[in-house]
Amino acid sequence: MEAEIEFIPEGGVTSPEGFFAGATCAGISKKARDKLDLGILFSEAPCVATGLFTTNRIKAAPLVLCQQRLQQGRALAVVVNSGCANAFTGGKGLTHATEMAKLTAEGIGILPEDVLVASTGVIGLPLPMKRIRSGIEQVILSRNGGHELAKAMMTTDTLAKETAVAVKKDGNKFSIGGVAKGSGMIHPNLATLLCFLTTDAAVEIDFLQSALKKAVDISFNMISIDGDTSPNDMVLIMANGLAESEPVSSGSERADAFQQALEQVCIYLAKCIARDGEGATKLIEVTVVGAPGLAEARLAARTVVTSLLVKAAVHGADPNWGRVMAAVGRSGVEMVESKTDLYIGDIPLVKAGRPLPFSKRSVIQLLKGREVSINLNLNLGSGKATAWGCDLSEEYVTINSRYMT
């Protein structure tokens, strides 16, 4: 029997049983004193927990703390702030992150080591701890507080990013929720993104780690806004087992259902990030099939979606398909010109390496849409992958030339 997976209307990170959240305006950033910028996520039951983190050699203090604490494979809460990344802040930064966890734990009544910490914002500035201390005291946790948490995590994001799915499999029910932030400094191998995932399923830790990696590889590691990767990127998942379902472990009947549901949540959030790229007006989806293998398909798709020339062409609705071919050609992936097919949407532009006559007006109309799909078939194997990104607009430069001013 196939699992039933349905998105929960207005679902979010507190949709799974036992999760609470809340946020407040702590005034961390002088530019936005009136916005939600400090939030807490909490489970009323102990959680199995794990995470994935940035590949940047510079690692923010909260990330270092999370990596240390997740070695125990458990957590009960996450405290997060926007407006200041607490990155490149040395020993003081780690002290501040540790204090954030301690204050959160005292307010909830749990052990400090069961609290994880995340930060996002400007690199190189110390946290305004006086405001942080006051802010943590003001956070009120509730079952609907996930929507506030989603807003508190935003920096240059224009939209909150959250979702949840309900899963039914052989009489067992559980749900998976998620919240994310990210708009700029986004590139495969995570990005300037934070994502917190929750589930009320009981999940064995080794399987949870494996499932998260698989889900991230086809979602957050397949998006790119601008080619930059930050010191603060993390994806965390917490499973509290409060649903009335049997434990999920590798090879169990519920393993595939859990994996599919987790991937749907992560892909949804990843596409939200790509669609909300700084200055973006369009979502770009690049699908590569027929690659020699999965790794090659992923590399080709990511190279195309990252290309500044492709992004600029999409922004201007310019049917300059040669830029797509050039990007694949420089990706390092095996490619035979005489075997390659290219489509914009459902319009074929190249077949077996031969340029085809096409209606320029029709392609331009597709490129003017809010979502643009580019499809490549290398006809060399069974590798298939999809990547997501956005167009490159003048607004991107404006946003990033005034980030601190």
Image (cartoon, rainbow, N blue to C red):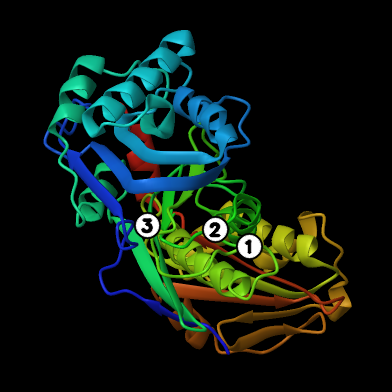
Q: Residues within 10 Å of mark 1 (few under 14, many from 20)?
A: some
Mark 3 sits on what residue? 276
Helix, strand or loop at mark 3: loop
Nearer to us in this view, 12 or 36 = 12
Q: Residues within 10 Å of mark 3 (few under 14, many from 20)?
A: many
Q: Is residue 82 above or below residue 88?
A: below
Which of the two labelled residues, at mark 3 and mark 1, occupies the earlier sequence position?
1
* Discs 2/3, front: 2
Q: Is residue 33 above or below residue 395?
A: above
Helix, strand or loop at mark 1: loop
Mark 1 sits on what residue? 249
Mark 2 sits on what residue? 203
User: Where residue 227 sits: x, y (%)?
Assistant: 57, 45
Single out the residue that lies furthest toward the top.
Answer: 91
Which of the two labelled residues, at mark 2 and mark 1, occupies the earlier sequence position?
2
Marks 2/1 in contact by CB < 8 Å: the verdict is: yes
